[in-house]
Amino acid sequence: MSEPAAPHSVSIVAHRGFSARHRENSPHAWHAAVEAGADVVEVDIRMTRDGVLVCSHDADLKRLAGRPETIAATDAAELTGIVVAGAAATPTLEHLFATLPAEQPILFDVKDERFEALDRLVAAAAASGRDRLVFGLHEIASVRRVRQRTGAAILGLLASPGEEDAFFAAGGDILRLWESDATSDLIAAVTRRGHPVWVTTGHGATGRRVGDFDAQALRRMAADGASGFLVNDPSGARAALFDQLAETKA
């Protein structure tokens, strides 16, 4: 996952699972991502009041379930009873591991970076026996904490611009850029130093939702050296990149 990019070696990362067709961070989205051939399945991780790791992007359930509960202030047993579209609104990490094949690479977008949550996640990852896990972290202190405890790959979901040097110095492996920031010059500057770049499509100046993509922009960034894309539609992104490559070779 850390090799420099050519169009044929790009990793397609299913953002919150196959979230273009299924509810984000749900078993249906995870299954569909695998069936679509996603190279990596991305999930958001938070910790409940009683220390259980669950898959949820938001800190509360307002958007997803129309309910006021916050993850960090609610016990796991209570959250288990909240169902959206036929599945738990916040499935557990244990459920994720039971759903995805053991060989399936997973990217954790760690939303709760309290050290207790980080330590629990690292321990759960080690106990799972899986060796194709990536920790997505926002804070440099979190990078240092996780690096001290695991040799797994760390993706920099950096909270502030200009932290790239500190991220790599702390033991980070892959830099994530937002599409709006992923200029040809910036991608080249990072990859020339031997560091891979992944891009989250959409958001910001693109005018698209986070994870939505434009095929031409996707191909441009891959040609510039980006080696991974976080997208809501992994099968569509694969077609945009690899069908174009096949046409070029033909």
Image (cartoon, rainbow, N blue to C red):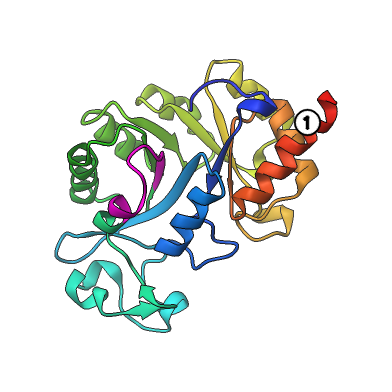
Asked whether residue 74 appears in the rendered view, the answer is: yes
Residue 69 rendering spot, x and y as whole percentages: 30, 78
Q: Type of residue at label 1?
A: Ala
Name of the residue lying farthest toward the top: 193
- Image vertical order of residue 68 relative to residue 6, above or below: below
Give the image location of residue 144, x and y in percent: 29, 31
Q: Determine whether 6 is above or below 143 in the image.
A: above
The residue identified by callout 1 is 246
State the image coordinates of residue 192 (x, y, percent, origin top left). Answer: 61, 16
Residue nearest the viewer, comparing 140 with 197: 197
**Residue 57 can be seen in this image:** no
Report how many numbered discs are placed on residues in the image. 1
Image-based side of 191 in relation to 79, left or right: right
x%, y% of residue 172? 40, 28
Residue at image position (26%, 79%) is 81
**Per the image, is 97 magenta?**
yes
State the image quarter where residue 150 is shown. top left
Span of residues in magenta: 96-108
Q: Is residue 99 left or right of residue 240?
A: left
Q: Considering only vertical position in the picture, is 145 above or below 65? A: above
Residue 173 falls inside the magenta stretch:
no
Residue 107 vertical position relative to residue 196 in the rendered view, above or below: below
Query: Residue at the location (70% across, 59% down)?
Result: 208
The one of 19 and 34 positioned closer to us in this rendering: 34
Quarter of the image containing the C terminus? top right
Q: Nearer the viewer, residue 59 or 232?
A: 232
- Element type where label 1 sits in the image: helix
Q: Badge 1 local density, few (<14 within 10 Å), some, or many (20+)?
A: few
Residue at 17% over, 40% down:
127
